[in-house]
Amino acid sequence: MTSPELHFPEGFLWGTATSSHQVEGGNVNNDWWLWEHDPGHIHDHSRSGAACEWWCGRAEEDVALAARLGQNAHRLSVEWSRLEPAFGVYDPEAFARYRRLFEHMRALGVEPMVTLHHFTLPRWAAKVGGWTNRVVVQRFSALAAQCARRLGDLVTMWCTINEPVVLVYNAYAGRQWPPGTGRFDVGLRALRHLLRAHAAAYHAIHDVQPEAQVGMVFNMPLVEPARPGHPLDRLVAFLQDWVFNEVKVRALREGRLVWPLAWPAREVVGLREACDFVGLNYYGRYLVRFAAEAPGSLFGRHVQEPTVRLGGTDWGQVAPAGLTKHLLRLRPLGVPLYVTENGVCDAHDTVRPHFLVEHVRAVHRAIQAGADVRGYFHWSLVDNFEWAEGWSARFGLLALNPFTQERLLRQSAEVYAHICRTNSVPADSASPEQ
């Protein structure tokens, strides 16, 4: 008997997501290239190297395969260090390379959603303090205008900043990513500047391309108390959720950074309602237990088991209901929503097929409950260089050997292809094409 199907709205975007440094290869002019060549920064001791050879032409091949699998959209990023390799100096050949890729995508019927900043900075920007320096905010706004002017005829959806709190947590308040400052006060300054950069880029793009859709992308884990009846667990879960999730939602709604307890609110000029859509990146749930010895994590320790953990990174517990919950949490912003990343680290592809189906169902539940969700982008199209985890973390629908560049289609790619082609997902526990 055929399983009943849950159908999605007409015109729904089905795609995958990538980012420039993780797939292009040879990004020698950014801060991450320097960072990964310093021993001890990458857990498996690997480097991005040639990555997935997208800059050399493999991008067109991989996107063509995505189109054959039924995908009608792809989220990717442009590399700032290629477009502006020196302060105020733009490279027309780099813009031309992206133009060729976007033209190819359009010819395939694949809508590009383009991110302007996905964690990497040009070396010149890193040298002046990165996101702690307002000059970088100004240069980012100028970059956004240049991209709209030179590429806007091919791109209508722009994401300004990818996961600002994740970047701040790992790079400025923490030491896992460049520049590895490890100071909370520096992290707060970087966060304010990232939000200012989004607002400035939003207005810069609209000045050039009024019809553009411009949004920001948030990572929002589900944070819950490990012991729901324990007041201290509830308190630290509330605080961690506020810092990682609520602060961003309120910033967009109110135009200011609002912190719990006695911290003063800080206005971010131009931020209020400076979003035509919001992208949600969701991976899993964290269960938080009070820990007096952990002030650096607001006195909360993550104790969820089972969990998706590798090296120094924990992506949390698989929990599709959290995706529904956060989409509904974003609904009051009154703008369209996209799931811009959702995936699982699974080299053997044993978890991913079921993960995909359950999370797509979670998106459908959110739509049925009133959330204006218009697209889903799975992370990722192809295995790539996964930041501090290097090549050990495998998220792709395509398995990649970084030494030979051989691609192999995983079973989950066929599962997702059925969803994309039919614009639907089975209503019960049966998975498509299994």
Image (spheres, rainbow, N blue to C red):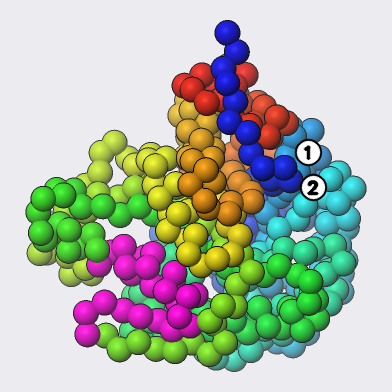
Left or right relative to 170: residue 395: right
Q: Secondary structure at mark 1?
A: helix
Front in this rendered view, residue 62 or 150: 150
User: Is 353 a magenta residue?
Assistant: no
Where does residue 102 sit, x and y in percent of width and height?
Answer: 83, 57
Q: Are marks 2 and 1 in contact (CB under 8 Å)?
A: yes
User: Mark 1 highlights which residue?
Assistant: 67
User: Is 244 a magenta residue?
Assistant: yes
| Crowd rating for badge 1 (residues with CA inside 10 Å; few <14, some 14–19, many 20+) | some
Label ID, residue 110: 2
Front in this rendered view, residue 87 or 209: 209
Q: Which residues are magenta?
A: 239-262
305 versus 374 height, above or below: above
User: Mainly helix, strand or loop, the magenta region?
Assistant: helix
Q: In the rendered structure, which amino acid carries the disc numbered 2?
A: Val
Residue 373, can we see it? Answer: yes
Q: Residue at x 75, y 34 (%)?
A: 70
Residue 124, can we see it? Answer: no
Q: Secondary structure at mark 2?
A: loop
- The quadrant of the image that shows the N terminus is top right
First in sequence, mark 2 or 1: give its number. 1
Front in this rendered view, residue 27 or 280: 280
Left or right relative to 227: residue 68: right
Where does residue 241 sit, x and y in percent of width and height?
Answer: 31, 62
Front in this rendered view, residue 143 or 274: 274
76 versus 397 height, above or below: below
Q: Residue at x 26, y 77 (%)?
A: 260
Where does residue 368 sit, x and y in percent of width and height?
Answer: 52, 43
Q: In the rendered structure, which amino acid carries the disc numbered 1?
A: Ala
Residue 69, quarter of the rendered image: top right
